[in-house]
Image (spheres, rainbow, N blue to C red):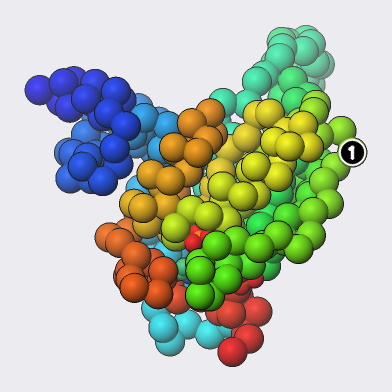
C-alpha cells in the first residue's frame, strides 16, 4: 500500500492534489534518509528544523533571534541538501597504519541568495561549505502585480562549471525564484537546486512547472497564499523581519 502511494507521488505532477498523500508516504521514505520525497520536492521534517521554524514564525520573535534562527536552520538544511555530494577515496596515514578514506571530490559549488532575504541563509550554509562562491540576484516583488523586478545580478565568473544552490526563505507565488533561476540559466548555470524555509503549494507548483530540472528543498510546506500573496500561516515579510525594517 505504502509503495503504491510512494509510486503515485513520484509520477504525479500536482503538489496541490497530493498534499494529504505525502504526509502518509513520509514515514517510510523518511526512515531512509531523513527527508521525504514528492517527485523532486523534498520537505524536511527533522525535529530541530521544525522546532526552530516555530520560533521563526512566532510574531514575538525579535530581529536578533530571527536572524540567528534562520542561520541555524540554513545550516541544518545544508547538511541534508549536500547528501548527494560526490566522494573520492584517497590514501592517508593514521597514527596506526596507512588506510583508504573518503574526501569530497572537489565539486565546485555556488550559493545564490535572492536579495534581500536570501542573505540571511548564506552564512549558515557557508559554515558547512566554506569554499563555496557566493553570487547575488536582487529581485523585489512588486506589491501590486506580485511580479518580480530584477535590479542586480553578480555571479561567480565560472558559472558553467559550478553546481548552484539558490536560496530564499520564502517561495510564495514562485515568481522570484523562477525569475532568479531564469537569470542564472541565461548566464550559463546548469545544475541548480532551490532551498527555502517556507513554501506555498502555489509557488512549488509554479516553480516545478517553470524549472522541472530544479530540485526544491523546503523546511515547511504551508497551506496557501492569502489575497495579498503572503504565505499562510507563514512568517510575514522575511526581509523586514530579518533586517528590522518596517
Ligand atoms: C520576498 C521573499 C521572496 C519573495 C517571494 O522578497 O524573500 O524573494 O518575496 O515571493 P514570490 O514567491 O511571490 O515571488 P520581497 O519581494 O519581499 O523582497 P525583499 O527580500 O527585498 O524584502
Ligand atoms: N514574501 C515574504 O516575505 N513573505 C511572504 O509570505 C510572501 C512573500
Residue pushed farthest right? 157
Residue located beneath label 1 in the image: 157
Foreground residue among 74 and 38? 38
Foreground residue among 32 and 203? 203
| SS type, badge 1 | loop
Foreground residue among 191 and 150? 150
- Quadrant of the rendered structure where residue 190 is? top right
Residue located at (58% from left, 67% from top)? 141
User: Image check: 68 left or right of 187?
Assistant: left
Residue located at (62% from left, 85% from top)? 244
Residue located at (58% from left, 71% from top)? 142
Counting from the top left corner in percent of width and height, residue 80 is at 51, 39
Counting from the top left corner in percent of width and height, residue 95 is at 79, 21
Counting from the top left corner in percent of width and height, residue 134 is at 79, 49
Counting from the top left corner in percent of width and height, residue 66 is at 54, 75
Marker count (numbered): 1
Quadrant placement of the N terminus: top left
- Quadrant of the rendered structure where residue 10 is? top left
Foreground residue among 208 and 84? 208
Residue 225 makes an appearance in the image: yes
Is 186 rendered above or below residue 91?
below
Residue pushed farthest bottom? 246
Residue pushed farthest front? 145
User: Image check: 9 left or right of 173?
Assistant: left
Amino acid at each position: 500500500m505504502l509503495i503504491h502511494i510512494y509510486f503515485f507521488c513520484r509520477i504525479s505532477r500536482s503538489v496541490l492534489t497530493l498534499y494529504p498523500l505525502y504526509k502518509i508516504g513520509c514515514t517510510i521514505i523518511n526512515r531512509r534518509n531523513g527527508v521525504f520525497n514528492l517527485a523532486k520536492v523534498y520537505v524536511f521534517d527533522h525535529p530541530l528544523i521544525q522546532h526552530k521554524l516555530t520560533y521563526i514564525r512566532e510574531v514575538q520573535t525579535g530581529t536578533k533571534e530571527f536572524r540567528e534562527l534562520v542561520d541555524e536552520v540554513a545550516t541544518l538544511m545544508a547538511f541534508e541538501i549536500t547528501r548527494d555530494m560526490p566522494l573520492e577515496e584517497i590514501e592517508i596515514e593514521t597514527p596506526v597504519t596507512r588506510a583508504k578514506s573518503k574526501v569530497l571530490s572537489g565539486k565546485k559549488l555556488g550559493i545564490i541568495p535572492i536579495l534581500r532575504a536570501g542573505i540571511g541563509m548564506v552564512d549558515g550554509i557557508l559554515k558547512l561549505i566554506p569554499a563555496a562562491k557566493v553570487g547575488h540576484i536582487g529581485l523585489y516583488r512588486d506589491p501590486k502585480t506580485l511580479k518580480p523586478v530584477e535590479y542586480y545580478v553578480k555571479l561567480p565568473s565560472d558559472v558553467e562549471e559550478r553546481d548552484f544552490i539558490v536560496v530564499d526563505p520564502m517561495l510564495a507565488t514562485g515568481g522570484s525564484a523562477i525569475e532568479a533561476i531564469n537569470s542564472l540559466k541565461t548566464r550559463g548555470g546548469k545544475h541548480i537546486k532551490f532551498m527555502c524555509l517556507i513554501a506555498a503549494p502555489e509557488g512549488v507548483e509554479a516553480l516545478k512547472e517553470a524549472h522541472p530540472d530544479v530540485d526544491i528543498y523546503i523546511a515547511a510546506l504551508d497551506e496557501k497564499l492569502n489575497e495579498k500573496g503572503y504565505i499562510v500561516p507563514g512568517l510575514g515579510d522575511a526581509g523586514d523581519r530579518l533586517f528590522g525594517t518596517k
